[in-house]
Image: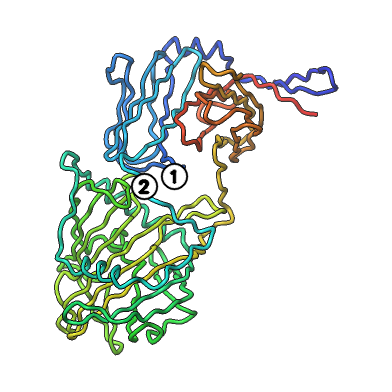
Amino acid sequence: MRRILIVPGLVLALVMYAHVTSAQQGAALANGDHGLVTVRLKLADGEKFSGVATIRLLTLAGSTVAASADNSGEQIRFADISPASYVVEVTAPGFVPVKQALEISADLHSITVFLTMTPETSAAPVLSGSAAVPIASSSGREEVEKSLQALRQTDSVPPVTASVACPVDLVLKGVAQRVEELVANLDRFSATERVEHFAVRPDGDVGAPDSRSFAYVVVVARHGEGDFQIDEYRDGGEDPGRFPAHLATVGLPALALVFHPKFVSEFNFVCEGLGTSGGKPAWQVHFEQRQDRPNQMRSYVIYKNTYPVPLKGRVMIDAGTFQVLRLESELAKPVPAIKLTREHILIDYALVQFRTGEQQLWLPQSAELYVERNGGRYYRRHAFSNFQVFTVGTSDKVQPPKESYAFTNKSDREIFGTLTVNPAPGQDLQPASITFGIPAGATVFKVVGSGKEVNLPVEAIESARFAHNGAPGSIDVSAYFVKTSTLELVPETVVLVKTN
C-alpha cells in the first residue's frame, strides 16, 4: 500500500508501508522469534580475513552462547539469539584476540559486527601495481655472496610456535582455493623482469654479473573442463638464447601450483606449524614429490628431450588469507640422466594492488636460483616490477571505496532504507542519517567521512543502523573500515522517501 502526501516546498513524499511494523517485530521476538548475529572478519588493509579462527558469542558473565571453532572464512552467523547483552570474541593463530560488545533487543532483528584482525607481528609491505617500481641496479658482490651462501646451505626447519597446532586440512583447503581463484580469474600479466646471472667457481667465488632485462608476459590458457596451461614470453618470444649463458629459467610462476587440485595428489604435505614470513604470521608447510605419482610440475628440456625433476621444499602461507608468501624448492633426489646434482629455488610473492578492479593478486616479486649440473655451477636472480594484470571479467568488478558501507540487495525489487551512523559517546557530534534506494540485485556504497555522504569523522564512528522496507535476509552488508564497528539491520520498516 502506498500513500502520497503533499508537504511544504512542493516535495512529494512516498511512504511505503511494510508487511510488519517495528512494534510487531518486537512482539514476535518477545514470543521466541529471536535475532541474528553476523560476524565479519577482515584485515587492516581491507582484504577479507579467510584464515582459521574461533568465533564465540558470550554472555557478559563469560558463558558461551554459540561458537564456531576453527572456522575458515570471513563470515559467521549465529541465529536464534535471545534479546540480551553479549560479547563477540574472536581468536586466530598469529593474530591479536578481539572482542566487541553488542546488544540484542526486542525490536532488533539482526546485527552485523565488523572486526579487524591485527597480526601479532608487524605487517609486510604491499607492492603497488598502479605505479612503476624501479628495478634494482646490479647487486653488490657482498649481497650476492650472502644470498648464494644461504641457498647452498643444507635444508633446515625454520622455528615455529610450539604452542600452536596446525590445522593442516584447513590450511591445504584454503591455499588450494586461492590458487584455483588465481588460475580461474587471471588471463595474463606482464611485468619488467631483470635477470642477473653469476657463474660460481668450485671455491664458491662468483664471477662478474651477466644482466638482462625483459618485457615479461605470462598467459593462462584454458582448455576444456578444468584444464589449463601457463606460458611465458620474454620480449615476445620463447628463445632460451635470450638468457645469460643460453640457459633459460622458466616455470617459476607455476611452482605455487603444487597446491592446485590438478597437481596436489603428486605431493606429500606436512604442516610444520605457525611461523612468520615478511612480518606476517604464516603456516609453514613442507612438500615432497611422491614416487608413485607422475611428475608434471617441473622438468628440464635439453635438445628437445624432457627430464622430470622431483621436488621437495617449504612454503610459507599467509595465516590470514591463505596466500602463498614464499616458496623454496630443491631436488628430492639428483637426476643422473642430465647430471643435475643440485637445484635450489627461492621465490617471494607480493600483493599487487590496482586502481581498478576489486581483485587482489599475489604474484612473484623476486626469485633466486642456484644450480649444480655437469660439473658447472651458477646463481641467478630475477626481479619483477611494473606489473600490469589482465583478469577475466575485470570490467564487471567494482572497487569498494575506502571507509564505506556496502549494501547489496538480494531481492528482485528495489528496497529503500535509512542508514543512521552513531558517533561514540562523549563526543560533541550528532548521528548522521541518509535515506536511499538499492535497485534489485545491485550494490550501493555509502562513504563515511567529514564532508562525505555520511558526514561524520571515520574515527568517531561507534555503530550504525540500517532500517529498510525489505524482507529479512534481503539485504547483505559489508564495511570497509579499519576500525571495529557494528551495524544493525532492521527489515520490514516504514521508510519515508522524498523525491522532487
Which mark sits nearer the N-terminus, 1 or 2?
A: 1
Q: Does the CB distance between marks 1 and 2 fall below 8 Å?
A: yes
Circle 1 Cα neighbour tier, 10 Å, few/some/many (<14 / 14–19 / ≥20): some
Q: What residue is shown with label 2?
A: 321
Give me the C-alpha separation between circle 1 and circle 2.
8 Å
Query: 207 or 47, which lies in front?
Result: 207
Image quadrant occupied by the N terminus: top right
80 vs 406: above or below: above
Q: Residue at x 25, y 71 (%)?
A: 145
Q: What residue is shown with label 1?
A: 47
- Which element type, helix, strand or loop, lies under badge 1? loop
123 vs 394: above or below: above
* Image spot of residue 217 (x, y percent): 47, 72
Farthest residue, direction right: 10
Q: Residue at x 15, y 76 (%)?
A: 334
Q: Residue at x 45, y 70 (%)?
A: 219
Farthest residue, direction bottom: 303
205 vs 18: above or below: below
